[in-house]
Image: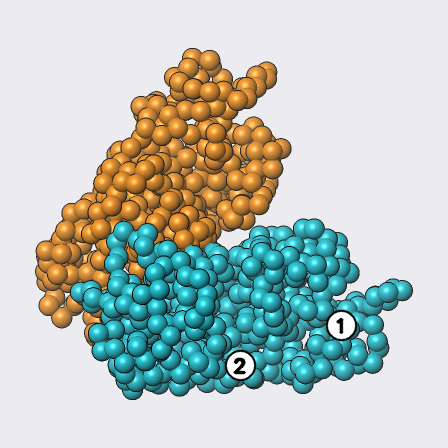
Chain colours: A cyan, B orange
Amino acid sequence: MTREKLRIGLFGFGCVGQGLLDVLNSSKGFKADIVKICVKDRTKKRSIPMSNFTFDKYDILNDPSINLVVELIDDAEEAFSIVTTAMKGGKNVVTANKMMIAKHFKELVEMQEEYKVSLLYEASAGASIPIIRNLEEYYDNELLYSLRGILNGTTNYILTKMYNEGIAYQEALKEAQEKGFAESDPTLDVEGWDAKYKLCIISGHAYGLFLDPGEVFHYGIKTISKFDIQYAKEKGFKIKLVPYVGKTNESTITSFVLPRFISHDKYLYNVDNEYNGVITEAAFADKQFFCGKGAGGHATGSAVLSDISANSYGYRYEYKKYQQGTVLNYTRNYKLEVYLRYQNEKDRELFGFEEVSEYFSGKFHKYVIGVVNLENLYALRDKLSDMDVFIVNTGRKF
Amino acid sequence: MTREKLRIGLFGFGCVGQGLLDVLNSSKGFKADIVKICVKDRTKKRSIPMSNFTFDKYDILNDPSINLVVELIDDAEEAFSIVTTAMKGGKNVVTANKMMIAKHFKELVEMQEEYKVSLLYEASAGASIPIIRNLEEYYDNELLYSLRGILNGTTNYILTKMYNEGIAYQEALKEAQEKGFAESDPTLDVEGWDAKYKLCIISGHAYGLFLDPGEVFHYGIKTISKFDIQYAKEKGFKIKLVPYVGKTNESTITSFVLPRFISHDKYLYNVDNEYNGVITEAAFADKQFFCGKGAGGHATGSAVLSDISANSYGYRYEYKKYQQGTVLNYTRNYKLEVYLRYQNEKDRELFGFEEVSEYFSGKFHKYVIGVVNLENLYALRDKLSDMDVFIVNTGRKF
């Protein structure tokens, strides 16, 4: 392999874009030429001379000397337009935009094939953790039973704060926002959307199925109360937001995003603050665990740089599991044991518990632990955010 | 990339060879043809028909239809002869033999270049953990401060037993031998040689320096006592055997293998039994942790299969850090704080403690905690195994 000389057009110069520049400037081994940076805001002060910037995306997209587009903007639909235009124009692309990939996954995979270009997006899931590349390259022939982990730094930061300091959700959220770990509109993070998009991307590489995010149940931490944290603490658990994907039989997988109790002897227990962690369980490699920073300009920037560097060697995902075509079906007909904290018996009835192993009723709180079908949770998905309940996957076999 | 049809000649059919066969047979996505298996023992019962075997290595090495040699024998010198003959004959090679690689590292790197062949050896360090490939591909431009971890399953199994069950070293060793986690001659494992060879391989990919194992200080767990475990427990620590490599300045690294105190909030604390774990600390990705099974036929076999599969796509290590040539020097002039349990004041004097922060003297045991120079430990290396002492790196900054 020989290295291709990269001439980069960069879209976006926020936290990750700036982080990438820092990482690039400090990298001894690798030089890439950032030809132009396209940004939206004409008035924002920039850390480098304005001559580096453009406000017209076609300055990059129509420049034949640019052979790699690095897309790091927030807006998923605009990102999709940029990325697909670049690919159609024969440019390779590196992106960190999970929402865009998850929503257009199959199309983006097919376009790579059609236009003979490479689209890399390691930073889109788990930031600095090289989970996509490892699933693609290293576990290409491994029989993967399941994958779960902590993929959202914002919620993990909030949950860590609540656990360590005994503060309420709103207070922890506010602090996360002040420290830059949560957006002013935290919806995508705290409702579990972000974790779900990442889960869908990972599922594509782990099992070769490109899931429609709309088909995957997600639930966040918006309604968590001090009582829930207190309950977990007394039992020796922390609560973490844990996306899961796993096989239900040879050719079928299920997946969901739910808070989960984690006991102190588990790997994820010590994954705190903005850190992410991923656990794979496989037939031969058995249990493996990857952990690293899941957010931040430099951590994400370093993942973007790895993709840029891989690009210079002509690397592209081969979607090996998709090519193998072993897993063909997706199901939500899957039972799991959950803790449900609630107020109103009518709410509880909606869940259709099949077995109840514990029930508690106090003056201010009630909870029940029992088995529900994922299909029932999915059917309730639009109601859940308005209900005075909190759901936690116990993670127990039953 | 297109897949090359692999025709494999396999050397060795012990635990890992058998494990590889199991993994290969169960792999849906990948078929490789094992043409011949070369073994030494003519009388041993085999799990597959004898027609698969040969006792003459040239049946494989001289067979032009075989394009990949997989070397999984114990004997490092014989392995070196097989591997180099295969490479000279234009065959790609996959091996798991850490002693062979560590002892002939530079030569093996140069031969790959000279004979235009690929030598892969992911299973040689950390078994199922893809640490080499990640260092090579994913962290190729990352400024790596240090790497440390648990790389030897045998000692970790023994230390876990001693900690959990309060039993003595000899008893734990015996149990490890009965369960197949330790060899009848456990020297290479319990004295730290095995961990050192792995550390040297990792250092080659992390920093591009091919260290002479003879230059690297190693110390094992042979002289650990119940007192040491008890001391650690009281302080909230476990003792783990932790190889370390790290930068001392821009162009210099140091490395060593020493037992280390691990507190309960550290990643390595929960890496027990035969599991391995690796922590990297880098400028931008920050702290990352990889964990998985470090021993066993299937875990190691799955790593070998990953290399075989990578081979079919034409993958080879590029030794990018070596090409970059940023790190050029190795030093043992490095201070670290250690716990030394000892009996005899004369022994203690040999270590040349520069600062002492704690000293304990009891009827049966004495210990001192203080700063020593790695150079001093290295100078004592031949005497240490006969001294009634035990050394633990406290891991503390001072």
Helix, strand or loop at label 1? It is: loop
The residue sitting at 25% across, 77% down in the picture is A63
* Quadrant the N terminus of chain A occupies: bottom left
Task: Determine the CA span between mark 1 and mark 2.
Answer: 24 Å
Nearer to us in this view, A57 or B28 = A57
Q: Which residue is mark 1?
A: A389
The residue sitting at 34% across, 83% down in the picture is A85
Image side of residue B227 versus residue A379, left or right: left
Please identify the quarter of the rendering in which residue A47 is found.
bottom left
The residue sitting at 58% across, 69% down in the picture is A189
Please identify the quarter of the rendering in which residue B264 is found.
top right
Q: Chain of mark 1?
A: A
The residue sitting at 27% across, 51% down in the picture is A28
Report x, y in % for residue A29: 26, 54
Q: Residues within 10 Å of mark 2 (few under 14, many from 20)?
A: many
Nearer to us in this view, B123 or B287 = B287
Residue, far front: A43
Viewer can see residue A396? no
Residue B275 in the image: above or below residue B302: above
Q: Residues within 10 Å of mark 1 (few under 14, many from 20)?
A: many
Q: Amino acid at mark 1?
A: Val
Image side of residue B305 versus residue A358, left or right: left
Could you tell which of marks 1 and 2 lies nearer the N-terminus?
Answer: 2
* Quadrant the C terminus of chain A occupies: bottom right
Please identify the quarter of the rendering in which residue A24 is found.
bottom left
Helix, strand or loop at label 2? It is: helix
Residue A51 in the image: above or below residue B79: below
Report x, y in % for residue A245: 53, 73
Label annotation for residue A213: 2
